[in-house]
Amino acid sequence: MAHSNHIIDGINKEINLQFPDRETFLKLTKNFKSLLPDIVIKKHEGVTVVREDLLLKGGTKSRAGEFLVSSVKKSTLVYVAPRVGHAGVAIMELAKLYNKDVVFFMPACKEISDHQAAIISMGPKQVEFERIAAMPNLNRLAKKYAEQNDYEFLPFGLNHPYTIAGFVRVCENILLNYKEPNEMWSVVSTGVLTRGLQIGFENTKMKGVAVARNMKFGELGRTEIISEPLAFLKNEKIENLPPFDTVPSYDGKAWKYIPKNSEKDIWFWNVAGDIKKPNNFDKKTINSYRNWNN
């Protein structure tokens, strides 16, 4: 169902509303050395675009989550991967870089999605399918499993202070070569990206396009929100998509709202490129269906 207005409808108890200041985050990541390629920034129709589609399949989730994964001492990570989203692929990319195993929990279904197929094709240690009524239930199951096996549970969307810290460091590195943007646009889902941008670019006006769900108190910070009426899984019209690789059901929905060739210094953070089903991967070979209480 499409949202006509992404209202603020409660409090997300999983987030820390009292973030440390920017300098605290920078101090935390002072000695961190990334293993990922440098960020790429290009101009398109007068808009300065952070081209994270040119990084890895996980895009910004890989870059922002790197500091968190690099800090984990345990050998195995546990994460809940929904049908769509780049976090699962990003975690697999980072796990390979930092010599970790990963166990994924996924909602049971008749056939896995392309994004889930991409994750499975990367060779995680284990995939558990569970029949659930809602995603929070699956996160509780995954967290309990991690505790029982002495594994590291990673929160949904990598919503963790170390992810914000890693992202603030990314912004600081950008400021070594660019002045702080006048205006930054991004798509908003859980709010992790826009909150990190707010701390990394303290004086930048933040504009967000909400595409996924109603927002909770504290998730937006000072970002000015536009509510995208298209349903979350529905792709943007081809004529509205930007002239670079993007996710048509996610970042692609923001481009039509962004002023082009403006006198202002306007930026857009393109989180990632589109993820397709891997070649020669037959999704029907994955037994992802489960009955209730099975």
Image: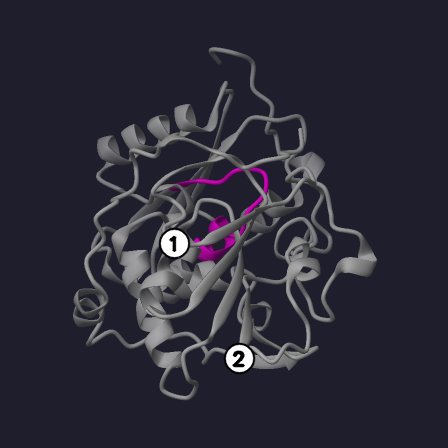
- Of the two numbered discs 2 and 1 on the same chain, state the one appearing first in sequence: 2
Q: Nearer the viewer, residue 131 or 16?
A: 16
225 to the left or right of 96: right
Report if the CB atoms under discs 2 and 1 are less than 8 Å apart.
Answer: no
- Amino acid carrying mark 2 in the image: Val
Q: Which mark is residue 40?
A: 2
Q: What residue appears at the point 61 percent right and 56 percent down from the top-left corner?
A: 251
- Secondary structure found at label 1: loop
Query: Disc 1 marks which residue?
Result: 222
Within the image, what quadrant is residue 246 found in? Answer: bottom right
Q: Position of residue 205 (x, y in %)?
A: 44, 65
Q: Nearer the viewer, residue 7 or 189?
A: 7
Q: Which mark is residue 86?
A: none
Magenta stretch: residue 2 in it?
A: no
Magenta span covers which residues? Answer: 79-92
Q: Nearer the viewer, residue 229 or 177?
A: 229
